Amino acid sequence: MPTLPPLDGIRVVDLSRVLAGPYCTALLADAGADVVKIEPTAGEDSRHLGPFRDGESIYFNVLNRGKRSLALNLKDDADRKVLFDLLDTADVLVENFRPGVTARLGIDYDTVHARNPRLVYASISGFGQDGPLAGSAAYDLVVQALSGIMSITGSPESGPTRLGESFGDLVAGLFAAWGISSALVGTRESGVGQHLDVAMFDSMLAMLPTAHSQLQASGVAPAGVGNRHPVSTPFDTYRASDGLFVLAVASQSGFEKLAHTMDRADLLGDNRFADDTSRTDHEPALRAEIEIWAKDKTVAEVVAVLGAAGLASSEIWNVEQALSSEQSRHRGLVESFDHPVAGTIDYVRQPVVFGDSARPGVRRSPLLDEHRQPLLSEIASR
């Protein structure tokens, strides 16, 4: 019989806005937490960010699925009292104000911790709560630029290139959700919560183990190499008769299998391709051999032949193809809810399968201040 969702019974007060914080709390809601989103009386910033349908931000509604909304003016004493009363019932607080703002509002960690010592308080910011850049404005583009990820993305021709999604925000939100879950385990044992300091910059640096390894080994900062892997070859996009395919070979046995699949056993005796390092040094020559083999085959034919040989290869899907694929459908990745204004909204649920835990029922995003009365009643009856 399925057990309860892993975060069932955990209440999260969400003071965050736009992306990093809301993404974190959406993951927690997907895992069963009761997330109460505190919004300004005019609504959270991303309610006003496109794309829109019937005046409703699809972006906001995807990121705030499964939450309840309460609108408060945090500069107003009465509204701030409502917030503190709510925090007395909470297990987690998430905020992504610039460092110093919560202190000015009187809702900083020390103040909140004094009232509710069990509370896990997560602060998400661009550069952390201290350090020379702590007070700097941080958008994803800035963090990608400073973290080094842009310097290794793109090609020598294109120069540094931003990743095609706001990964600085998303990775910070992901680490925050991991940190909160870990801290809740500690709180269960100790009875005392703690302050989590999650920085976008730190989070992006933590995602660069290959580049960091290259730097340590050579003493030279790695640069962008396009779609190919910086260490292993062949590991890139290649051209067939009707488009591009990807091929990933990361072992000597894999290369031997590729050579036989191409009916080019002679490549195994070529010193240029003797090992992974040599193949990477002579990447253009090996690329030419692969593309000569593939030039009279379609992408589908190439992928079928390589797949039958047990090699990792695929066509390149766009976002629509990935979301609608049989793999996504089988895994149940895309869920949907009916919004009273915007209609049906699809979203990708958090992707971890928790064994026998029941998956929380699909809960839609909230209208602004929609849950004021039930939340005030819950506070009053505690």
Image (cartoon, rainbow, N blue to C red):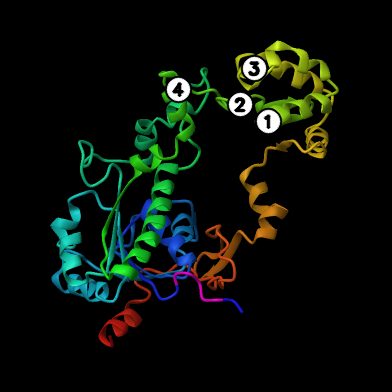
Q: Which residues are magenta?
A: 3-7
Q: Which mark is residue 206?
A: none
Return the residue at label 4: 217
What residue would you read off at disc 2?
A: 232
Kind of residue sitting beneath label 4: Ala
What kind of element bears circle 3? helix
For the residue pair 46 and 227, the one nearer the viewer reads as 227
Instruction: Name which residue type carries label 3.
Output: Glu
Residue type at mark 1 is Val
Earlier residue among tags 1 and 4: 4
Cα gap from disc 1 to disc 2, whole angstroms: 7 Å
Residue 359 x/y as whole percent = 56, 70
Determine which quarter of the picture holds residue 354: bottom right
Q: Which residue is mark 3?
A: 283
Q: Nearer the viewer, mark 3 or mark 4?
A: 4
Contact flag, marks 2 and 4 (Cβ < 8 Å): no
139 vs 46, nearest the viewer: 139
Residue type marked 2? Ser
Label 1: state its secondary structure.
loop
User: How far apart are labels 3 and 2 at the CA level?
Assistant: 10 Å
> Eyeballing the image, is 13 above or below 172?
below
Q: Residue at x 63, y 22 (%)?
A: 276
Q: Residue furthest bottom?
A: 381
Q: Is residue 149 left or right of residue 82?
A: right
Q: Is residue 2 left or right of residue 98?
A: right
